[in-house]
Image (cartoon, rainbow, N blue to C red):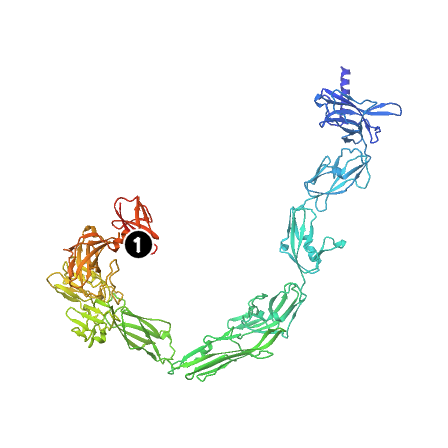
């Protein structure tokens, strides 16, 4: 038992010793069942055996990177002088490893072990053979091994970027040059493999962090006992962090300006005028000039990397790294060296309101003339001559207020605001140390003399209390720009002392001005005219080509003064005769004619001198047509009388009587007239009527114009409110034009009238148009008891019949200036009472009543003195308003009728004995039909109670029917077709006239019935066709 224990202990100690000496390459002799035995000897590059291995030398065999065999060096003594060193390798494997390559690794023991990888066969390589044997002691399998004796660091300093890797073997060599290279043990600093700057794995160096601007990492190979051939035993590695961005400092982002040759200023900015990112960037950045002839690199050894500005201009310096760059704008200038005054002036003299910078630039020169920036600014300082405190009408002020500011730039306006003294310094902007200065005296005085009025007019006073003194007017008319001059008692001057002279060149005005006291007196002496001269002279500094100099300054201007005779009043037309349908000019003529008129003194009013209803605004108004208040327009609203009053300063100085009458105009033919503005009376009709009237009829008198004997009859005047039938001749001029003077008859208008049975001539007293039911109101308890069937007939505007409640028919309005016929249907007299027009709304005056409205029926009523009125019934089928009736004598249309409340009101113009026929027109379909009945011309026929029965016959086959038949419109299979026309629109209406389709050409969707197709052409015509569906 004890022996066994001792044996086990011995084996354990042996195993521990082996483990401590042999390399740990992961060899496991029991991992594979088979083996390939190889007896290996090491030879040098000459093929000689390598001898003298120590006992801790091992050779390893590897297949697929796995250690399959490990052998310790063995010795075999052939003689006392010969020993064979060999390795008995048992390479483990299986049949699957047959033919695989075998690699070899040598570990040479000692105080410090060296491992040599990848020993190469001296001859042909042997591959794995399962259970095979290669070599023997007398013929060992040879591997080449050349032991290194010395090493050398070939590059002692290396630069590498953060994150980059490199092989340290690239920077070390061994001797001999073909020696096997041992596995290297590289360390940094204090022997560490990794720190914050780098890490080493095997022979690979990886840069982790910048070593700073001047720092580095020292890397040493641990080759114990091996001597270097040179002075370097380590590699110094600088880890470089490139710039990711470069930015100029804020003060340089807009560029820099340096003087020509100022290398210090330029290179100071190039050295420190930027920042880089990241913060640990230690990349060496380089500057480059965009123009090396202007900013050139310095070449002396002590100035390498610096630049010299040698040419003026603006250039770009670019600072670049591997991944970033930035541009710096560099402006090279030639500096200002001095500023010199130009001219003979030491003290500048100017006026309040003037711009000093209009002249000051001529008074200095910035030198040298080729200086890059010759711009200046101006500073205002206190004068050495006084305390810089002044007084004027607005109170005390300081020198700082004279120009309103203390600093000005070129191009500014340096306007003198107040008088006083200052020093103005001209200072270089580029080189503020360079300056020159002037004393500046600012004084009150004009640079321009103008006048509020170039022509002043005054009225000659008429009495002592009138205005004789015009001093203030004269003074206020003079405008001194910018200010009125002030007399300076102790003014110093080189050329001329200041002076202001104001004088009158006319005897009409007495004038005196004292400049010292600034006192002006002026008064009117007599009627006349002349000039007032204003003359100012002083000394002022001016700019010349030779610089500044003082010169005499003069201004002269004058204005004209006229003394007129004063206005006494106005002359006007004392009588104005006009009509209500026109306006009239009204003019005030000053007295005397050339007297000046102040419009504010004039007042013109017009006052009615006749009755004016409270509901009316006025019968007339007068309005000025311009600002002179001398020209007016009279605008009448009614006939009547008025008085124009003209006042001057509230006192009436003139008046005018205005009569507003009526104008009556009638063309050739008959017309029923009634005057309202006044009567027309004559001793001889020819004087008033001329030779244009052929005949005048009244209810009880006649007037006729015989071609040979002239006028004869028993009408001696035309009275207001009376109905007349007037015929005007056809021959030239074919126009009756009467201007009827207002006589007051309108105010005394007759309001009561007795209407006898049968026909009455009805005068019209109104000057405005009124509704017929308003005029003939039945609200009067004692009058206007009209009878059913009573009729009011007009000449050309239809007629109306009383139905028991109101008047109905085609006559709806009683037109001013027209007369009417009244038919009393009863056997008793009617008391008719007109409403006074003043109780009705005020209308608009009209000269001529309108003719009958236009329709499909065209006729001329003028040749006929009388007409026939008919109330007809055409049956329910033809009672709609779309139907109208035309009255004919033969083929000539003589009148028409309209449908009112189902009855047709027809007016016919004809002569006694003529026979009247009728036709019916449908405005919707365009059809024309005959009416079966005819009747002789008479005064009237039918009434509302017993209308004349008319029956409608067939379609007229005349022009209208032919047009319809040949319209070019056809309806085929529900589609409307149009031929021969340029169509603008297609409209379909039903029998009642309502539009049922627009722009459509199909009628298939319409219900059965009668329709009318209307085609509108682009030339404005309308063609129709009846459609039965």
Q: Which residue is nearer to you in this view: 980 or 907? A: 980
Q: Position of residue 331 (x, y in %)?
A: 65, 58
Question: What SS does tag 1 mark?
Answer: strand
Task: Find disc 1 in the rendering and name its residue.
Answer: 1022
Rendered position, 874 above or below 155: below
Whether residue 778 can be seen here? no
Quadrant of the rendering where the N terminus is positioned: top right
Rendered position, 772 above or below 103: below
Q: Quadrant of residue 741?
A: bottom left
Q: Position of residue 760 (x, y in %)?
A: 15, 65
Q: Position of residue 27 (x, y in %)?
A: 73, 25
Q: Residue furthest right?
A: 80
Q: Position of residue 470 (x, y in %)?
A: 43, 80
Q: Residues within 10 Å of mark 1 (few under 14, many from 20)?
A: some
Position of residue 486 in the picture relative to residue 959 (left or right) = right
Q: Quadrant of residue 74?
A: top right
Position of residue 541 in the picture relative to residue 608 (left or right) = right
Position of residue 875 in the picture relative to residue 330 (left or right) = left
Q: Quadrant of residue 911?
A: bottom left
Q: Which residue is nearer to you in this view: 749 or 514? A: 749
Residue in the image at 15% along x and 73% along y: 714
Quadrant of the rendering where the C terminus is positioned: top left
Rendered position, 359 above or below 788: below
Position of residue 893 in the picture relative to residue 141 (left or right) = left
């Amino acid at each position: 038992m004890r022996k066994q224990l001792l044996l086990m202990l011995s084996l354990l100690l042996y195993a521990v010793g082996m483990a401590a000496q042999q390399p740990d390459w992961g060899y496991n002799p029991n991992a594979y069942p088979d083996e390939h035995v190889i007896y290996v000897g090491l030879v040098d590059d000459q093929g000689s055996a390598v001898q003298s291995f120590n006992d801790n030398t091992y050779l390893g065999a590897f297949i697929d990177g796995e250690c399959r065999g490990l052998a310790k060096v063995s010795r075999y003594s052939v003689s006392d002088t010969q020993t064979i060193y060999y390795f008995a390798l048992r390479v483990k494997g299986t049949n699957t490893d047959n033919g695989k390559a075998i690699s070899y690794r040598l570990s040479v023991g000692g105080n410090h072990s060296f491992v040599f990888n990848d020993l190469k066969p001296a001859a042909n390589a042997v591959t794995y053979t399962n259970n095979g044997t290669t070599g023997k002691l007398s013929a060992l399998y040879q591997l080449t091994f050349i032991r290194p004796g010395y090493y050398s660091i070939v590059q002692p300093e290396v630069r590498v970027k953060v994150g980059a890797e490199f092989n340290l073997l690239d920077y070390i060599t061994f001797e001999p040059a073909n020696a096997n290279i041992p596995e290297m043990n590289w360390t940094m600093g204090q022997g560490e493999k990794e720190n914050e700057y780098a890490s080493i794995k095997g022979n690979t160096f990886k840069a982790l962090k910048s070593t700073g601007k001047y720092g580095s990492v020292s890397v040493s190979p641990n080759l114990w006992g091996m001597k270097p051939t040179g002075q370097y035993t380590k590699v110094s590695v600088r880890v470089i962090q490139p710039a990711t961005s470069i930015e100029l400092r804020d003060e340089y982002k807009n560029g820099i300006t340096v003087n020509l040759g100022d290398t210090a200023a330029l290179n100071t900015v190039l050295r420190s005028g930027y920042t880089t990112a990241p913060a640990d960037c230690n990349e060496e950045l380089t500057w480059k000039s965009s123009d090396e002839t202007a900013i050139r690199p310095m070449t002396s050894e002590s100035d390498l990397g610096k630049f010299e500005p040698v040419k003026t201009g603006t250039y770009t310096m670019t600072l670049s790294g591997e991944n970033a760059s930035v541009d710096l704008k560099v402006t090279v200038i030639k500096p200002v060296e001095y500023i010199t005054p130009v001219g003979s002036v030491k003290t500048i003299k100017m006026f309040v309101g003037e711009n000093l910078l209009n002249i000051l630039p001529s008074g200095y020169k910035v030198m040298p003339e080729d200086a890059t920036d010759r711009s200046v600014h101006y500073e205002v300082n206190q004068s050495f001559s006084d305390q810089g405190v002044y007084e004027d009408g607005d109170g005390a002020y300081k020198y700082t207020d004279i120009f309103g500011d203390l600093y000005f730039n070129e191009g500014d306006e340096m306007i003198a605001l107040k008088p006083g003294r200052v020093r103005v310094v001209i200072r270089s902007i580029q080189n503020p140390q360079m300056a020159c200065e002037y004393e500046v005296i600012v004084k009150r005085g004009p640079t321009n003399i103008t006048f509020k009025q170039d022509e002043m007019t005054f009225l000659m006073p008429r009495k002592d209390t009138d205005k004789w003194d015009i001093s203030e007017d004269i003074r206020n008319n003079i405008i001194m720009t910018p200010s009125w001059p002030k007399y300076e008692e102790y003014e110093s001057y080189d050329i001329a002392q200041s002076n202001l002279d104001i004088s009158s060149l006319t005897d009409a005005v007495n004038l005196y001005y004292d400049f010292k006291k600034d006192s002006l007196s002026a008064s009117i002496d007599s009627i006349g005219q002349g000039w007032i001269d204003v003359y100012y002279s002083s000394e002022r500094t001016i700019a010349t080509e030779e610089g500044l100099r003082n010169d005499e300054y003069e201004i002269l201007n004058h204005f004209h003064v006229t003394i007129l005779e004063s206005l006494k009043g106005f002359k006007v037309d004392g009588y104005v005769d006009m009509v209500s349908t026109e306006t009239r000019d009204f003019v005030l003529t000053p007295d005397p004619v050339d007297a000046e008129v102040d419009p504010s003194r004039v007042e013109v009013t017009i006052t009615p001198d006749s009755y004016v209803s409270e509901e009316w605004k006025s019968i007339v108004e007068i309005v000025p047509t311009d600002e002179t208040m001398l020209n007016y327009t009279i605008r009448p609203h009614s006939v009547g009388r008025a008085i124009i009053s003209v006042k001057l300063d509230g006192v009436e100085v003139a008046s005018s009587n205005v009569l507003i009458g009526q104008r009556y105009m009638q063309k050739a033919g008959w017309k029923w007239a009634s005057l309202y503005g006044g009567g027309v009376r004559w001793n001889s009709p020819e004087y008033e009527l001329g030779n244009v009237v052929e005949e005048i009829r009244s209810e009880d008198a006649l007037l006729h114009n015989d071609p040979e004997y002239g006028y004869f009859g028993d009408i001696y005047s035309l009275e207001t409110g009376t109905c007349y039938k007037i015929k005007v001749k056809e021959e030239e001029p074919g126009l009756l034009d009467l201007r009827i003077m207002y006589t007051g008859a309108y105010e005394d208008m007759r309001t009561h009238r007795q209407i006898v049975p049968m026909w009455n001539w009805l005068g019209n007293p109104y000057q405005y148009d009124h509704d017929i039911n308003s005029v003939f109101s039945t609200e009067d308890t004692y009058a206007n008891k009209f009878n059913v069937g009573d009729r009011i007939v007009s000449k050309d505007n239809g007629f109306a019949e009383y139905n028991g409640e109101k008047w109905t028919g085609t006559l709806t309005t009683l037109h001013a200036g027209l007369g009417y016929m009244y038919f009393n249907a009863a056997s008793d007299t009617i008391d008719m009472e007109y409403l006074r027009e003043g109780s009705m709304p005020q209308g608009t005056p009209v000269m001529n009543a309108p003719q009958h409205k236009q329709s499909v029926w065209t006729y001329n009523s003028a040749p006929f003195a009388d007409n026939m009125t008919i109330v007809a019934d055409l049956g329910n089928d033809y009672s709609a308003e779309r139907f109208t009736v035309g009255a004919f004598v033969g083929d000539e249309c003589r009148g028409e009728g309209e449908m009112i409340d189902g009855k047709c009101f027809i007016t016919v113009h004809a002569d006694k004995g003529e026979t009247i026929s009728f036709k019916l027109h449908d405005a919707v379909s365009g059809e024309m039909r005959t009416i079966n009945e005819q009747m002789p011309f008479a005064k009237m026929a039918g009434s509302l109670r017993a209308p004349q029965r008319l029956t409608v016959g067939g379609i007229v086959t005349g022009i209208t029917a032919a047009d319809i038949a040949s319209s070019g419109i056809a309806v085929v299979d529900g589609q409307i077709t149009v031929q021969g026309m340029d169509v603008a629109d297609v409209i379909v209406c039903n029998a009642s006239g309502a539009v049922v389709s627009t722009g459509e050409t199909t009628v298939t969707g319409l219900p059965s019935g009668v329709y009318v197709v209307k085609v509108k052409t682009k030339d404005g015509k309308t063609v129709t066709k009846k459609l039965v569906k």
